[in-house]
Image: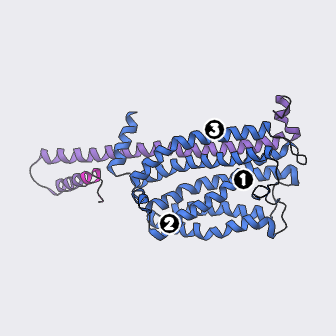
Amino acid sequence: MWKWLHPYAKTERTYYLCQSLLPWFSLFGLAVILFATVWGLAFAPMDYQQSEAYRIIYVHVPSAVLSKSLYSAMAIAAFIGLVWQVKTSFMAMIALAPIGATVTFVSLVTGAVWGKPMWGTWWEWDARLTSQLILLFLFLGVISLYKAFEDKQQAGKAAGVMAIVGVINLPIIHYSVEWWNTLHQGASIMKFDKPSMPAEMLWPLLLSILGWALVSGAIFLLRMQNEILQREHRRPWVVALANKSEKQ
Amino acid sequence: MHFEDFSSFLDMAGYGVYVWLSFGCAALSLMILWCDSFFSKRRLFTQVLKEQARQARIKAAATQSTTAGQSATAGQSTAAEQSATAQKRTNGEQV
């Protein structure tokens, strides 16, 4: 049943898969993210309580959602790499880590910028904010641990274990607003039965999450290709590819 | 369009600084990440070409030194070994 997956353990095949997917992810990602951002910034109605400041939601929520999804994806890649000894899986893991770190950083910064006018403070050591900061450190930890090893197979294993252990932080982030008294508000869109947001505000938000996901996907494809090129730089197909790119 | 004119769009009911700061930070971060990913691909290709040129030079030097003199000295034999290694590398074998 899963036999069709086997050829992708070969890096050359994966490289060309990334190559063919890349333009679609880039094109749709850019289009969706621009469309959703313009919709959210200029066309969505105003919030009765937070006035226009609530529009930060259209960049804060997508980055926060993506930070958790990217961490999960990274941990799954690490798990596959550790259990089935798939080399490309570790490459996927380390390709995802900097993207995750960036979106986590964006979610923290936009959260601070939103907190200043609404809560009166840039930063507070409360449960949601602190656990999200730990997520950033986990991403950075995985990257630095991977870079600390010369042998990349060893590096993948060590960083992979760290990525898997860090999964414990994901439910903590998610339920932090319920378990503790935090400044941060509870979930408003993840209640699918009855989202506490009007449709004119919800649609641009959902679209911007999709846009962020597609753009992250495009950057992932690029970084995955880079990882493959770095690891396989002596293979004839890589040398041929480099020669071809030079002529263009 | 929710706003009446462009200046009220920029002003965001007094929250303009916060709104534009957060959107600017997000755009900048994603752009830097994309540029890093995009340009490191080019850099990797240049590195591969450099390495290939280096191997070719080693190979050329080795063949030159073996054709120049017939007597097998220690220096020449290492040059020949190097050329063999270079050949294997370009074939993509593990050395």
What numbered label is drawn on residue A107? 1
Kindly identify the residue that appears in the image at 29 percent across and 47 percent down: B55
Q: What secondary structure is marked by label 3?
A: helix
Return the chain for callout 1: A
- Give the percent coordinates (x, y) of residue A69: 64, 58
Count residues near mark 3 (Cα–Cα under 10 Å), then give few for <14, some for 14-19, many for 20+.
some
Ranked by sequence position, the earlier of labels 3 and 1 is 3
Answer few, some or many: residues within 10 Å of disc 2's Cα (few below 14, many 20 plus, some between 14 and 19): some
Q: Are marks 2 and 1 on the same chain?
A: yes
Give the secondary structure at mark 1.
helix
Q: Chain of mark 3?
A: A
Q: Earlier in the sequence, mark 2 or mark 1?
A: 2
Q: Does B1 sit above or below residue A223?
A: above
Q: Is residue B30 magenta?
A: no
Chain B drawing hue:
purple
Please state which amino acid type lies under the numbered disc 3: Ala
- The chain identifier of the residue carrying mark 2 reads A
Asked if residue B94 lies in the magenta stretch, the reply is yes
